Image (cartoon, grey):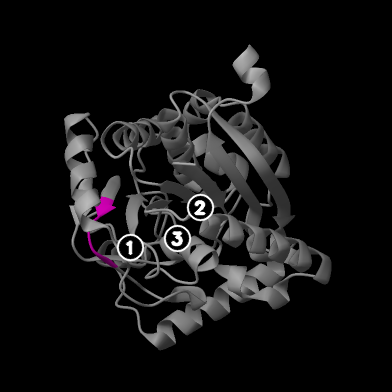
């Protein structure tokens, strides 16, 4: 197929296997193995990776709503790759020109620094971020003043149109990651103490020791969450399945109509990462001239990983039933 889609979780604790019981771990590992086989079989010329950052490489000193990285490197947090990304700079530049003409104002970077929000899925699918030509498409999902969800729908729709109209010879794999329901232990700017706000503005110069300490703290929070304790919002499988059903029915507009605060109140601060899924599915739907079909769907609530974990694979084109209709 000229285009495919994979959406999946990217929780930082995905590299901490001992947090899961044997049944959950076996099920998730089977799905990740299948996802990797699917990604490699796609033999994509370029991967368009819709992802975000957790105030690690980006800060509120300058927070773009959307950004296309033309060159990038990775932080290596939570055991993910720490290296330069293999970025398709030429195609990325052409995409940015197209997006600007289409009314989608994206920032650019020649030295983007991404954390596991961009890298975890690429590590799981391709054994690293330097193994396949990629265009990283960043969305502010965790910083202050996030863009409304309908702008992610517009972004993805324009990206799909670009590849359909101007790069039809390329095999493209759209990858979105994050969530689903997910309430990571991260501060919100509004309501945070002054010193925390200042750190969110200035950013952090991460060291190996600092990354290790953050991972240790999050692991302990994961253990606590797995016991049903602590202050984090509980996972919301009902909301997760509703989102998956809407993706399955191609009803991206209902997803895009959600108000940001309502999403967070319902499914946690990390549920804002639904923007990455929305943009990826919008790209596939646009590429497929209004149609796609999901051919694999997996979901499991994993409190110890602080994530409602899902993996979905989809292809452009209508199912037989939808085509007949």
Q: Is residue 62 above or below residue 84?
A: above
Residue position marked by numbered label 2 in the rendering: 42
Between 80 and 77, which is closer to the camera in this rendering? 80
Residue position marked by numbered label 3 in the rendering: 117
The quarter of the displayed image where residue 136 is located: bottom left
- Eye-nearest disc, 2 or 3: 2
Q: Position of residue 164 (x, y in %)?
A: 34, 33
Q: Position of residue 90 (x, y in %)?
A: 19, 53
Between 268 and 135, which is closer to the camera in this rendering? 135
* Residue drawn at x 21%, y 29% as measured from the top left: 103
* Residue drawn at x 37%, y 35% as measured from the top left: 160
| Residue at the far right in the pictured view | 23
Across the whole image, how many numbered discs are drawn on residues? 3
Residue position marked by numbered label 1 in the rendering: 200
Q: Position of residue 111 (x, y in %)?
A: 21, 66
Q: Position of residue 167 (x, y in %)?
A: 29, 40
Looking at the image, can residue 76 be seen? yes
* Residue drawn at x 36%, y 67% as measured from the top left: 56
């Amino acid at each position: 197929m000229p285009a495919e889609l994979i959406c999946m979780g990217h929780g930082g604790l995905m590299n901490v296997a001992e947090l899961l019981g044997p049944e959950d771990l076996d099920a998730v590992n089977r799905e990740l193995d299948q996802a990797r086989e699917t990604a490699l079989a796609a033999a994509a010329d370029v991967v368009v990776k819709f992802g975000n950052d957790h105030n690690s490489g980006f800060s509120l000193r300058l927070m773009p709503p959307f950004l296309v990285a033309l060159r990038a490197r990775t932080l290596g947090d939570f055991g993910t790759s720490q290296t330069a990304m293999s970025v398709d700079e030429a195609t990325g530049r052409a995409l940015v020109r197209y997006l600007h003409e289409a009314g989608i104002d994206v920032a650019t970077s020649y030295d983007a620094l991404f954390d596991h929000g961009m890298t975890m899925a690429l590590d799981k699918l391709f054994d690293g971020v330097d193994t396949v030509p990629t265009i990283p498409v960043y969305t502010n999902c965790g910083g202050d003043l996030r863009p409304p969800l309908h702008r992610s729908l517009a972004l993805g729709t324009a990206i799909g149109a670009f590849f359909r109209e101007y790069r039809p010879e390329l095999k493209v794999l759209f990858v979105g990651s994050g969530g689903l329901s997910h309430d990571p232990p991260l501060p919100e700017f509004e309501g945070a103490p002054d010193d925390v706000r200042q750190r969110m503005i200035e950013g952090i110069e991460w060291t190996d020791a600092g990354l290790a300490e953050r991972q240790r703290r999050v692991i302990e929070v994961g253990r606590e969450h797995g016991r049903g304790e602590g202050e984090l919002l509980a996972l919301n499988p009902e909301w997760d399945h509703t989102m998956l059903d809407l993706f399955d029915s191609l009803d991206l507009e209902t997803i895009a109509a959600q108000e940001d605060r309502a999403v967070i109140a319902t499914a946690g601060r990390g549920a804002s990462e639904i923007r990455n899924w929305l943009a990826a599915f919008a790209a596939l739907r646009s590429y497929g001239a209004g149609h796609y079909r999901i051919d694999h769907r997996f979901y499991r609530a994993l409190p110890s990983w602080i994530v409602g974990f899902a993996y979905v694979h989809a292809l452009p084109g209508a199912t037989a039933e939808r085509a007949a209709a």
